[in-house]
Image: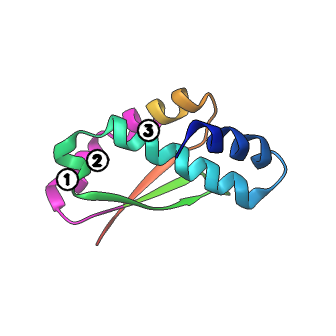
Amino acid sequence: MSDFIKDILKSLSKKDKIIKKIYNTSSIEDIWNNVIEKKLKKYTKIENYETKNKILIVSCNKNIVMQEILFKKNEIIKIINEQLNEEIVVDIKVIRR
């Protein structure tokens, strides 16, 4: 997503919960794509972001990758929150696809 659109969504997200979810999900996906190693990224997909509980739901199609994500979960959460300067994610749930 372009920076221009992100800036608009960011300002609108302060007024609307749906736009906030769209903005947060988009931002998390961008960070996910930069943080997760290529070998893991190709087996994962962000399925949902629960705004109320601040839970990121990621699907995965390989058990070994699921374990790797769960092992690095706290580190990933920390990076996402630091890059967004806000506690956006408090937990990551990994589901099988």
Mark 3 neighbour density, 10 Å: few (under 14) some (14–19) many (20 or more): some
Q: Which residue is mark 3?
A: 31
Membership of 84 in magenta stretch: no
Q: Which residues are magenta?
A: 59-77
The residue tagged 2 is: 69
Question: 9 and 45: which one is in front?
Answer: 9
What residue is disc 1 on? 65
In contact (CB < 8 Å): disc 2 and disc 1? yes
> Going from the N terminus, do you reach mark 3 or mark 1 first?
3
Point out the image quarter for the C terminus. bottom left
The picture places residue 3, in percent across and down from the top left corner, at 58, 36
- Dominant secondary structure of the residues highlighted in magenta in the image: helix
Residue 90 visible in rendering: no
**Earlier sequence position, callout 2 versus callout 3:** 3
Q: Amino acid at mark 1?
A: Val
Q: Given the image, on which type of amino acid does mark 3 rest?
A: Ile
| Dot 1 alpha-carbon crowd within 10 angstroms: few under 14, some 14 to 19, many 20 or more | some
Label 1's element? Answer: helix
Residue drawn at the location 77% of the way across and 41% of the way down: 11
Residue 58 in sight from this viewpoint: yes
> How many angstroms separate mark 2 from mark 3 (CA)?
15 Å
- Secondary structure, mark 3, is helix
| Mark nearer the viewer, 3 or 1 | 3
